[in-house]
Image (tube, rainbow, N blue to C red):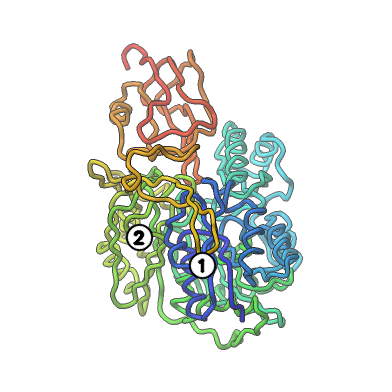
Amino acid sequence: MFTKVLIANRGEIAVRVIRACRELGISTVAVYSDLDRDALHVRLADEAYALGGQTAAESYIDPKKLLDVITRSGAQAVHPGYGFFSENSDFAKAITDLGVAFIGPGPAAIDVMGDKISARHAAERVGVSGVPGTTDILTDSQQVVDFGNEFGFPVAIKAAYGGGGRGMKVVNAADEAAAALESAQREAVAYFGRDECYMERYLTKPRHVEVQLIADTHGSCVYLGTRDCSAQRRHQKLIEEAPAPGIPNEILTAMGEAAVKVAQGCDYVNAGTVEFLYSDGEFFYLEMNTRLQVEHPVTELVTGMDLVELQLRVAAGEPLPFSQADVTITGHAIECRINAEDPAGGQFLPSPGPITALTVPSGFGTRWDGGYEAGDEISQYYDNLVGKLCVWGRDRDVAVARMVRALEEMRVEGIATVIDADLAILRHPDFQAIDHSTKWVEEVLDLSGVGGAATTGEDTDAEPKVERNLDVEVNGRRFAVKVFVPESQVGAAAPAPGAKPRPKRGRSSGAAASAAGTGQITVPMQGTIVKVVVKPGDEVAVGDPLVVLEAMKMENNVAADVAGTVAEVRVSTGDSVASGDIVVMITPASGS
């Protein structure tokens, strides 16, 4: 077994891996950006190394910086978590070339399954069929139009090197194709570093069912049951449960066996998940995620197995200590992702900012996997997952009731969260009757009036810190060190060169003006402008997109609230904006 593991990630998953390592007596190494200097995963790790920068591109997905820390720290293995470099074969190869173990599949398997197009071919070779589609890389939106005209709309555009709903757009009609492809490519680059996309039919009422598997280096591959992840918005999961309910056992077994075939077909090793779409008694291969999934705790709760521990042991060359016949599923488990988002009647708007209070529920069968504590801040530059609330029950009805109780106990202040939306889902008769699909949240569930607006005081910011360079002596040896101290401890000293002041939180009066329909268009959250759609003089109608705002790796259209003429555009592509900033001024048409 390893003695030191570096976690090339942040947030909840870094905390999860650190805790598993600690239980096994393994020393841990954290990495952090400038914004994460005081983050929970940094506080828990045995060692921590600065990467610098703010955005993921400047820190967590800068390969040179990570490889340098791996070498300096003396880590024997690297756990990539999920997201970032977890499905990047170049990174996995660079690590193994250093003589360091990558806690995941080999680069060749990542190449096959990380590219969703070659993954379809691999699945077909072992007799596992996918959703009807093409395997050609999209180069022009006309390809989408032609496919839709021949096979029918809607059509799904997907990032070839993506997953988790990132870089996926649904085209309902031909005139949506160009904008959808452009947006999918932009999101794919932002989250995965590559813009290749492909397309397939978008099933009208499918359920999203996935199979967890684990494979060792000794030829053993075992599946650990199924999960249902159909409660989604923007093709990203909100609630997951295990096992997948309401599906005949023979079909669940067939899915498990198909998943093992897919994994063995590419010589897969370590933990992985094969995803399927289930509709009308049939299932179709969707994709394989060559990493640990966000929703892995529900599998752990119904199998009694620690998946991170198994990952570590497999990466160290140990054989799996059980066979397929030893796997038993007991009871039912549900996970709710607690994201920093305001449900906002179904819009699910990102809500970055400081967490001023956090109280998590406890009790029998209740588990919290979190990446933050009170006083920590959710940054606009990273994923908005605060943590995962999980429950276990002897059956599904008990698990649903337990989750409702746990969500009602949970208290999060300073940011908006999806808790109220989770409760609306769990209490709905469709969900309780397992009569929901991947589109149900957006097309059926009524979230009007459901919001999770942040609760803030006059000023919820923690005291800013400033950078200071000091000379210190340790055992008679002089060192030059950089320290970050509260501003009050250095008087009215100016911040370090290049440092940006922390913005004040809370919405400006501009947000209220926009809501009243005056033509003063504000942004609902902090983020970056990735596209400006209009220019002065353009005529717009209510609901027309004006700019596209990216926050927490999600794109949001900022739309006109009145019909009229664009008088002024105050932002450009690449600009950073704060919540409530006015970005466009519209002169209302007469009668508006």
Q: 469 left or right of 394?
A: right
Question: Residue 279 is drawn in which quadrant?
Answer: bottom right
Mark 1 neighbour class, 10 Å CA radius: few under 14, some 14 to 19, many 20 or more: few
- Closer-to-camera residue (448/98): 98
Q: Which residue is mark 1?
A: 475
Report whether residue 414 is seen: yes
Spatial CA span between label 2 and label 1: 36 Å
Specify which label sits upstream in the sequence, 2 or 1.
Answer: 2
- The answer to whether the residues at label 2 and label 1 have Cβ atoms under 8 Å apart is no
Report whether residue 343 is seen: no
Give the answer, above or below, for where 294 lies relative to 505. Answer: below
| Amino acid type, residue under disc 2 in the picture | Glu
Mark 2 neighbour class, 10 Å CA radius: few under 14, some 14 to 19, many 20 or more: some
Q: Which residue is mark 2?
A: 373
SS at mark 1 in the image:
loop
Query: Residue 242 in the image: x percent, y percent?
Result: 46, 71
Q: 560 left or right of 82?
A: left
* Image point (38%, 69%), residue name: 390
| Amino acid type, residue under disc 1 in the picture | Asn
